[in-house]
Image: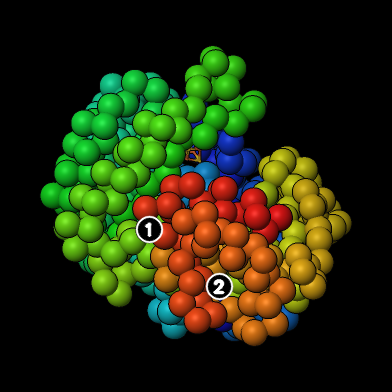
Amino acid sequence: MRGLYLHIPFCRAKCGYCDFASAPGTPEETDAFLKALEKEASSYAGLAGKFNTLYVGGGTPSLLSAEQLEKLFSVISGLTGPLRGLEESTFEVNPESLDAEKAGLLKKAGISRISLGLQACQDDLLKRLGRVAMSGDFLKAFGLLRAAGFDNMNADLMCGLPGQTLKDFAASIDWLLKLRPEHVSFYALEVHGGTPFSAAGVEEEPEAAADMYEAGAAALKLAGFRRYEISNFSQPGRESVHNLNYWEQGEYLGLGPSAASYLGGERRANTAGTAAYVKTALAGDEIPLQYRETLSGRKKNAEKIMLGLRKTAGIELPDDIFIEFKEETDRLTEAGLLEKSGRRIKIKEDRLYVSNAVFREFV
Ligand code: SF4
């Protein structure tokens, strides 16, 4: 099982909390980026035909023009073959950049799953986050995608936002559920250095976020969703196959600025700088890396456990890894954080929000 990820580093404007590799770009910069992406993709021609899933993220991939999308899909299909032959292909959309033509184009290209950014249903909160799209724009985009034939859609929400109450978060979930998406993800606000939120002194609110996680999980469960990962909920059979591969320590190739790969036991990530990425790729030079590391032995096994524990089903450990980490897993079980059944370990559902405390034991 191997996934292909493409990072499109352009957005209409920068959200206050965002520390992804993304920034507004001109049409010329976007064209140059697509040429660079084509160059990078061509250096992996040996992997052509070996992917099961695709995820186009960013950034805002739906910001590309219809012509640029055609170019993007020709680069992608050089590695994957026809998208309809893949097990799953996800495309991230932000509502402000979608129209009926693009929705139709994504469908025609063979995209099978859409991930649409919402974050909250209250426009005052969305404005505070620096989001371009308001809730009405989301509604319109959701309708356009359904009309184009998409029957597998995720929506993203955020919790622990400045000024957001538990009631606000519950209202966002109710609002979203009326649209009957197949998948919902929600994430607590993290304030990263270098972001406008960090400069403005916005603080994280972990306790409020924990309450929202609990209330959100309960509401989604009641609506028939299954929590299959800390932050991910799906209708039965609508789990993200591409993301499950990450949590199962499967291989993947990432293309574009900041994109991470895990191939042949090596973990690496491209430079996050779009200008440096484009310049080196077009010159035919090696793209600068943020990091490169070969995982083996205890470190590789610890990572396997940490990734597997993100899933609500946990992870069934092979005998050798079970014995290697017996002390840690016993300690966590005694502390009431882990459940053990044979060689399967999992984080207790009401402790998923403090999963970082569990992961620290394995670092
Ligand atoms: S739309 Fe997403 S990637 Fe773009 S700036 Fe906002 S949070 Fe960042």
Whether residue 130 appears in this view of the structure is: yes
Quadrant in which residue 208 is drawn: top left
The residue under the point 50% across, 81% down is: 342
Quadrant in which residue 89 is drawn: bottom left
Q: Give me the disc on residue 168.
A: none
Foreground: 241 or 8? 241
Q: What residue type is labelled 2?
A: Glu
Residue under label 1: 349
Residue 223 at x, y percent in the picture: 16, 57
The residue under the point 65% across, 55% down is: 361
Position of 344 compared to 116: left or right?
right
Eyeballing the image, is 96 above or below 220?
A: above
Residue 52 at x, y percent in the picture: 51, 79
The residue under the point 76% across, 65% down is: 299
Mark 2, mark 1: which one is toward the viewer?
Answer: 1
The residue under the point 34% across, 21% down is: 163
Position of 195 compared to 268: left or right?
left
State yes or no: Cβ of the residue under disc 1 lies below 8 Å from any atom of ligand 1. Answer: no
Residue under label 2: 248
Q: Do the residues labelled 2 and 1 touch (CB within 8 Å)?
A: no
User: Quadrant where the N terminus lies?
Assistant: bottom right
Residue 82 at x, y percent in the picture: 47, 79
